[in-house]
Amino acid sequence: MKLVKFNNTGKFTGFPIYINADHVTAVFEVPSEQGGSLETHIYGGNAGNGVEWIVEESLLEAVKKLNAAKDVSLS
């Protein structure tokens, strides 16, 4: 199991979350509800049965962390 540390947002701000890199199926950005910025979402599991986390890291930073955990280089 390859756990990657991220920083939580929302009511969990200030608490880290460790996500299993082997179970991440998507990482993406969406406009925040407050407007003016983007939120990074990490999705794990199967479509319809997965879990979604919103983290403080940027999309690129999240992808780099996940790839590093899986020993994959960014191209």
Image: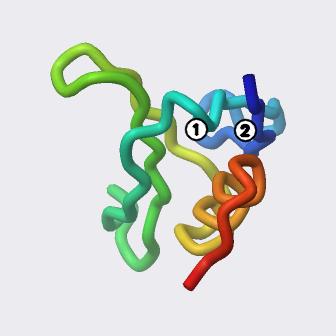
Q: Nearer the viewer, residue 39 or 3?
A: 3
Q: Position of residue 4 (x, y in %)?
A: 76, 40
The dot on residue 10 is 1
Query: Answer yes or no: do the residues labelled 2 and 1 have beta carbons within 8 Å?
Result: yes
Q: How many marks?
A: 2
Q: Nearer the viewer, residue 3 or 61?
A: 3
Q: Position of residue 43 (x, y in %)?
A: 40, 37
Report the residue that reaches farthest toward the bottom: 75
Q: Position of residue 9 (x, y in %)?
A: 62, 42
What is the secondary structure assignment of the residue under circle 2? loop
**Image: 31 above or below 33:** below
**Image: 25 above or below 11:** below
Quarter occupied by the N terminus:
top right
Q: Residue at x 76, y 48 (%)?
A: 69
How packed mark 2 is, by other alpha carbons closer than 10 Å (few <14, some 14-19, many 20 or more), is: few
Q: Nearer the viewer, residue 48 or 73?
A: 73
Q: Residue at x 66, y 63 (%)?
A: 72
What kind of residue is marked 1?
Gly
**Image: 5 above or below 59:** above
Residue 28 found in image quarter: bottom left
Residue 34 found in image quarter: bottom left
Q: CA distance from mark 2 to mark 1?
A: 5 Å
**Image: 63 above or below 14:** below
Q: Position of residue 74 (x, y in %)?
A: 61, 77
The dot on residue 34 is none
Looking at the image, residue 63 sits to the left or right of residue 46; the answer is right
What kind of residue is marked 2?
Thr
Disc 2: which residue: 13
Looking at the image, residue 31 sits to the left or right of residue 14; the answer is left
Residue 37 found in image quarter: bottom left
What is the secondary structure assignment of the residue under circle 1? helix
